[in-house]
Image (tube, rainbow, N blue to C red):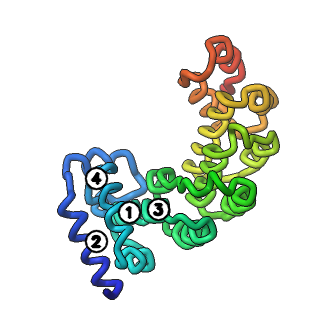
Amino acid sequence: MNKNKVTELVQSRLFELQDTEYRDFHARLMPTVEKEKIIGVRTPILRKFAKEFARTEDAVGFMKALPHEYYEEDNLHGFLIESIKDYEACVRALDIFLPYVDNWATCDMMAPKIFKKHLSEFESKVEDWMASGHTYTIRYGIGMLMRFYLDDEFKEEYLSRVADVKSEEYYVNMMKAWYFATALAKQYDAAIVFIEEGRLEKWTHNKAIQKAVESNRITKEQKEYLKRFKIK
């Protein structure tokens, strides 16, 4: 089936799954995406469709039909990438797709399980993404560092790598704040130094403190200590 036919098939199926109330609600959460680009398919339903669609020959053609027209098509593409079992193929698919990602939701939902088996080699790819210059590719790189490298694989140098990312983009700096708030929950002794020494930009610094204080993974004493470092 040619690309146009595959796209028509997918779009037709997505509109069959449409929930307009959900579309209206979700559109308010993504100011960077035009409402007309959102069909309104709930994530569990879209994941179920992706699981079925991934088994078909049309899935390959769909992934080549970039850019996609609708937000849900992008999310479907992301779920198809998650289903790729080969590490190298999965990374290649992300390298192709990430430049087309234009919102935080699509960016944040993609976390292929295959990466857990390749964390040593995946580290350099994460670093490449963080240095890419594209808002959501940078955000994705930081997100992968947060998801996979704050537990047993943690190294203190990762904190510096995230702190050294410089951007005027809200969605990059929000992810930096989220990363440090999570680091404070999982690697407090190493992460608190970056707050004490003011090594983050003011907005990111304050947002990281805010998110950490809102977390139930931070002790009451740690929260009170963190509040002392808020920059007015």
Residue 45: mark in rendering: 4
Q: Quadrant of residue 71?
A: bottom left
Q: Residue at x 66, y 53 (%)?
A: 167
Looking at the rendered structure, the secondary structure element under dot 3 is: loop
- Circles 1 and 3 in contact, beta carbons < 8 Å: no
> How many residues crowd mark 3 within 10 Å: few (<14), some (14–19), many (20+)?
some
Amino acid type, mark 2: Val
Task: State the separation of the CA atoms marked 4 and 3.
Answer: 16 Å
Q: Quadrant of residue 217?
A: top right
Q: Quadrant of the N terminus?
A: bottom left
Q: Which residue is mark 3?
A: 83
Asked if the residue at tag 4 contacts the one at tag 2, i.e. Cβ–Cβ closer than 8 Å, the answer is: no
Tell me where residue 87 appears, x and y as whole percent.
Answer: 61, 65
Query: What residue is pinned by disc 1?
Result: 76
Is 2 on the left or on the right of 129, as rendered? left
The single residue placed furthest to the bottom in the displayed view is 2
What is the three-letter code of the residue carrying label 3? Ser
Instruction: Measure the alpha-carbon separation of dots 1 and 3.
Output: 11 Å
The mark nearer the N terminus, 1 or 2, is 2
- Look at mark 2 in the image and give the residue it sits on: 10
Q: Earlier in the sequence, mark 4 or mark 3?
A: 4
* Inter-mark Cα distance, 2 to 3: 17 Å
Q: Earlier in the sequence, mark 1 or mark 3?
A: 1
SS category of the residue bearing label 4: helix
Earlier in the chain: of badge 2 and badge 4, it is 2
Question: If you read the primary sequence from the N terminus, does the residue marked by circle 2 or circle 3 appear first?
Answer: 2
Give the mark toward the camera: 2 or 3: 3
Tell me the CA gap for discs 1 and 2: 9 Å
Residue 212: x %, y % from top left:
60, 27
Give the residue at x 66% y 25%: 232
